Image: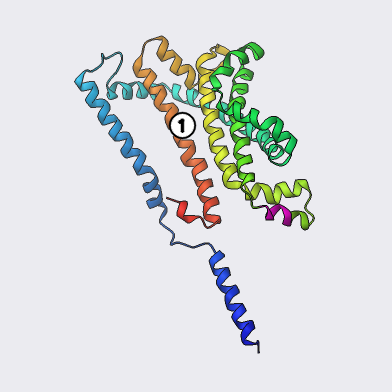
Amino acid sequence: MPSPEVQDLSKVEAGLDALDTPTTTQTEPRWRRVLRAALPPVVAMVVVIAIWQVLWAAAFWPEFQLPAPLAVWSKFEDLVGTGKIWEVLWTSIHRAALGFLAAVVIATPLGLLVAKVRHVRAAIGPLLSGLQSLPSVAWVPAAILWFGLNDGSIYFVVLAGSIPSIANGLVAGIDQIPPILPRVGKTLGAGRLAAARFILLPAALPGYIAGLKQGWAFSWRSLMAAELIAQSPDLGFGLGAYLNEGSNYNDMAEVLTAIFLILIVGIGIDLLLFRPIERAVLRARGLTGALT
């Protein structure tokens, strides 16, 4: 039979394990979670439309500057009825997705190098921070001169906008890793690639995901800036081109329709892709207090 001291030590260890165990909460029905996530933005949108309707009814601005909400809705129905909306959305979304995936492939090893190699950080770190603050629209004229009016110039602008954000997010995540974890990996004989794959990236996952979210936002903004400025029949007809068409024809209803579509796509990608991944990572780490 174990001695009383050993029994007390076992109780202490059991207590510490219980503290380390993530707190489990009762699973909420899926429909209620979806409703809780969707209701606040829907209510906010209703309030915005109500204020818009009041301003239009009060005739603070002429009709060509502030059309009625129903006029914009009618423009949206025409876009859907003619089937043009699918061409517009597909052209922009598939470009943004391809550009973002290419940015992830480039920015991930770049972020690892900047975070773990001192000389690379000293040389490239300030440059990445500076590029992150540079408006993507500034790259459009240079990209057109370098690559011409084709997809290459648009993808360059997307990459220039998203790579610094993703790399800096990964660097910030790695900087917050407790030093004991890399030491444990080194003690266990993990090489550089194994340490990056099994220690650094998993430990830096929250910061990395935050960088991915920001990188996607910059990809989307950069794409809209490129499509708005670079105009050619060879480039297809995306959301930026649709917005530019409304501006050229002084069609405020079309301009607002394009703006709402750009906003809806941006919010939809965040809610449907990044938010579930972020929630899964936080839940796996027991950070349920951060979940709303």
In the image, 203: left or right of 65? right
In the displayed structure, would residue 174 be above or below residue 126?
below
Q: Which residues are magenta?
A: 179-184
In the displayed structure, would residue 207 be above or below residue 144?
below
In the displayed structure, would residue 208 be above or below residue 283?
above
Q: Measuring from the top left, give residue 89's x and y in whole percent.
A: 48, 26
In the image, 182: left or right of 60? right
In the image, 246: left or right of 3? left
Q: Residue 172's image quarter?
A: top right
Report if residue 65 lies within the magenta region: no
Residue at x-position 59% and y-position 18%:
139
Residue at x-position 35% and y-position 16%:
252
Residue kind at label 1, given as amino acid type: Val
Query: Which colouring convention does the figure follow?
Result: rainbow
**Crowdedness near tag 1: few (<14), some (14–19) or many (≥20) residues, C-alpha within 10 Å:** some
Pick the front one: 57 or 201: 201
Q: Main secondary structure of the magenta part?
A: helix
Q: Secondary structure at mark 1?
A: helix
Q: Measuring from the top left, give residue 291's x and y in whole percent.
A: 45, 51
Q: Measuring from the top left, give residue 211's x and y in whole percent.
A: 57, 38
Pick the front one: 148 or 19: 19
Report if residue 181 lies within the magenta region: yes
Q: Residue furthest bottom?
A: 1
In the picture, the quarter occupied by the N terminus is bottom right
Q: Measuring from the top left, give residue 5's x and y in whole percent.
A: 63, 84
In the displayed structure, would residue 207 be above or below residue 24?
above
- The residue carrying mark 1 is 265
Residue at x-position 23% and y-position 18%:
60
